[in-house]
Amino acid sequence: MNEFSFRPREWWQRLVAPIDAALLGFLALLLGYALLLLASASPERLNNQLINIAVALVAMRVAAQVPPQRLMHLALPLYVGGVLLLVAVALFGDVSKGARRWLNLGFMRIQPSEIMKIAMPLMLAWYFQKHEAMLRLRDWLVALLILLLPLALIVRQPDLGTAILVLAAGFFVIFLAGLSWKVLAALCVGGLASLPFAWTMLHDYQRQRVLTLLDPEVDPLGRGFHIIQSTIAVGSGGILGKGWGNGTQTHLEFLPERHTDFIFAVLSEEFGLLGNTFLLVLYALIIGRGLMIAANAPTLFSRLLAGSITLIFFTYAFVNMGMVSGILPVVGVPLPFVSYGGTALVTLFLGVGILMSIHKHRMLVQK
Amino acid sequence: MMRPAEFKNPEQEINRFQRRLAVAGGFVLFAFFLLFARFFWLQVIQHEHFQTRAEDNRISLVPTVPNRGVIADRNGVVLAHNYSAYTLEITPSKVADLEAVIDELATLVDIQPKDYKRFRRLLEESKNFESLPIRTRLTDEEVARFISQRFRFPGVDIKARLFRQYPLGELASHALGYIGRVNDRDLATIEKHDAEDNYRGTVHFGKTGLEQQYEFELHGQAGFEQVEVDAGGRAVRVLARTAPVSGNNLALTLDTKLQQVAEKAFGKRRGALVAIEPATGGILALVSMPGYDPNLFVDGISPPDWEMLNTSEDRPMVNRALNGTYPPGSTFKPFMALAALELGKRTPQQTISDPGYFTFGGHTFRDDKKGGHGVVDMYKSIVQSCDTYYYVLANDMGIDAISAFMHKLGFGSRTGIDIEGESEGVLPSQAWKKKRFRKPEQQKWYAGETVSIGIGQGYNAYTPIQLAQATAIIANGGVIFRPHLVKYIENAGTGERTLVEPQPLRTLFFKPGNLATIRQAMVGVNKEGTGARAFAGAEYVSAGKTGTAQLYSLKGAKYEADKLHERLRDHALFIAYAPAEQPTIALAVLVENGGFGAQSAAPIARQVLDYYLLGKLPKAAASEDAEAVEDE
């Protein structure tokens, strides 16, 4: 009977044991900020987002419980499964808004490309860990293949936003694994050289987005509308912003997707440069903490994984803010931890959980 | 030599990893700095620019269309006014898939194929970003249903619009005219008047008649609302407001009841009637039959209606009173007689002996009465409508003398009435013929052509309003007024009235004796002559003259009305004024293909005069006298 007695203190300690207080602290600030913005942009969605956050926190806590070694075992099946699902999407996926991204499982619809955001760094980190002893040219080429195979499937859907994130996730692992600068430079040159070719591979609408970025005023009521209106929202915010709930661009519906991809425009309009800077600082703190975890991680696998996950947070943030402020083309990348929506939030917090797990398990391995 | 990377060297590996991590961290900071720089650029340096653009987005100046002025007759009977109704409007530039949106709307609001067709037509005609009605006159229920679903329809909105209504329908339609949606030609007119600002929100424009002529009086001064709008262009709230000023009201000289009597007297026959107040030139009745219902045009006329109005053989869109030109026939004789007296070509007592024809240059001009009228003086020539008298007279006077005199009476010139669409008609003269024809042999005036001019045939062609105008000049002793429909213009706000002064254009100084002779003869027409049957038992003394305008040359064969196709029958005319001593009304009646004047035109004149002077219709009012004898 004694074993089952009610000992809340002990339960609590066990609950919070794998949690990294610093990381969660920064994230709590960020989530609070996000809810404040959502309360202005779309108050009717607050309850839903609270549920999303709860689910995401549970996912984080579960992931934090899983030791990195266990994660390593998951890498290959998750990756292979993910690729198979992407193939299935290409064959039987549901088309929505002109893109084939969803797979209908009968009881739910899933978006397999989302899995790749976690599976890709896991797989590559696992691969490099496995060949830790000697990294030959062949290994780099295999790594490249691991990266490109699912990427091609995602680009084909087409889903440029997810493709960029998956590419970034894979690239960060390869970069952190120590791909020589010469090769990196060569890849850069090669990438630039193949731009014209890539241009011809893009869909018309994707090309339009790039052109629109270069000159949004060409079609101010059509394709340029989003960029123009979000830029106006950002610029009209000024230094201090128009105040919470007072954004005219936001509340008069000039902003598209104001609760999801364009929520940063709401922030910029209502809280101004000051609010933006606060957000940048929060992101910098979260990323800094993530990089610290990566730096102190015991194994190559956990180092690469932690570094890549952290830099994905950065990628999300940079691409989203760049798009909303009009320096990057419009791609569907949410503002991490802030944009409304459950899927991205769960994926992100799974990443956070993995970071926490890596951090908590660093001593155990060393011992 | 082996590359260091190939050894498992944890220390070195961690170092390298941490260096890479540092590079990545540096890149993150650099990227964030880049973002900060971008924010700084937008939010600090360019702030004012974007601030302005956000305000421009937010604030919109919405014109509020003023109430269009009301048109009422001389007794205050309303002929055109406005009512407010809700319309469902689509701004096509803000809607991606019009078909889909309209299909969706049809689930909330009853949209008929005719509504859809009209919308399509408006869409083709419109070029700017205006909103176009898909449905007009929504019921309250439909308004409520749409409002609850409004968020689903960006670019679609309900608007309260003022609609023009002509409560009496077809009555006086040719005088009132109608309004329709602003088109390119109207825009040019608006531009010419420098009124673009005032017309920014205006959808309708006067197209014909008084609505057209007095457009800028009726329109009023647009107001403006400074409103906050959302991205869908919907007003969220009003920030400031300048009220519109209603357009001016028109009070007409027209007498609605008289107009009604006149239109009813025509029945289903085509024709025109113009009744003028001789002392002012004010138009008492302006009839062109058939008319049309101007209400059809207000929402944009439906294609089948338009088709019907335009292709009808009866040509209801033509204003016959102003635009139709007809030979005056024998109604021309009193004016010829006056000319003869004034020019000293005849005295009233001078007689001719009428054998029933007049031969000139080998051609025989026949009188209607076989065997002739015997000895005919001027009085008898008018009362019995003797043709021979005027054949001879015209020949004696010569075409240019006739033409010069008739020109003074207004024949062959626009009267200047205050609505558009007046024809000049044809006042034949040598100069006219030279201008009219190309070939030299056609340009020459032949003396034989003058002969039939004397009885109002030949090249003569005048509008009913010219005929009425000339009759009014006889009635008022030679003063020429500009005929007009508007009595005064009333400022809707202050009630201040601007009188349209009766404008005596000029006065013709006839010798009083001469005028008296003509007037006496015209009284004789209605007492003992060709108009006597129509005016039998009248409680006042009236003056008149019958006329028949030949359409069909019979080349000497006997005219038999029954055997001719209805549309080839002669036009019947009648001119009259009353009371004979102090005339208060002068008129001209034309009945197309009505046979001869005494038969169909005179009875209409009788009804109008009776109603105007006595306030009642003649006993056994007949608009056609089947037993009248042709005796002109």
Image (cartoon, helix red, strand yellow):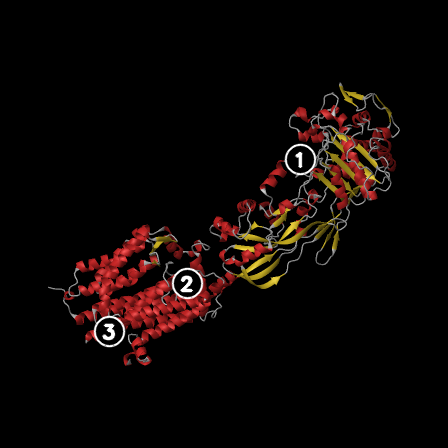
- Disc 2 or 3, which lies upstream in sequence? 2
Name, please, the residue furthest toward the front. A1
Q: Amino acid at mark 2?
A: Phe
Which residue is more in the foreground, B143 or A336?
A: B143
Label 2 Cα neighbours within 10 Å, binned few <14 / some 14-19 / many ≥20: many
Asked whether the residues under marks 3 and 1 belong to the same chain, the reply is: no
Measured along the vertical axis of the image, is residue A142 above or below residue B623?
A: below
Q: Amino acid at mark 1?
A: Asp
Q: Amino acid at mark 3?
A: His
- Pointer 3 and pointer 1: residues touching (CB < 8 Å)? no
**Chain letter behind tag 3:** A
Residue hosting label 2: A262
In the rendered image, the quadrant that contains the N terminus of chain B is: bottom left
Name, please, the residue furthest toward the left. B1
Label 2, label 3: how many angstroms apart (C-alpha)? 37 Å
**Chain letter behind tag 1:** B
**Chain letter behind tag 2:** A
Where's residue A307, x and y in %? 26, 68
Where's residue A282, x and y in %? 36, 72
* Horizontal side of residue A52 vs A1, given as left or right: right
* Horizontal side of residue B80 vs A218, given as left or right: right
Asked whether the residues under marks 2 and 3 belong to the same chain, the reply is: yes
In what element is the residue under mark 3? loop
Front label number (2 vs 3): 3
Residue hosting label 3: A361
Label 2, label 1: how many angstroms apart (C-alpha)? 65 Å
Name, please, the residue furthest toward the right. B349
Label 3 Cα neighbours within 10 Å, binned few <14 / some 14-19 / many ≥20: many
For residue B541, what is the image quadrant? top right
Residue hosting label 1: B314
Measured along the vertical axis of the image, is residue B315 above or below residue B18?
A: above
Residue at image coords 66%, 28%: B437
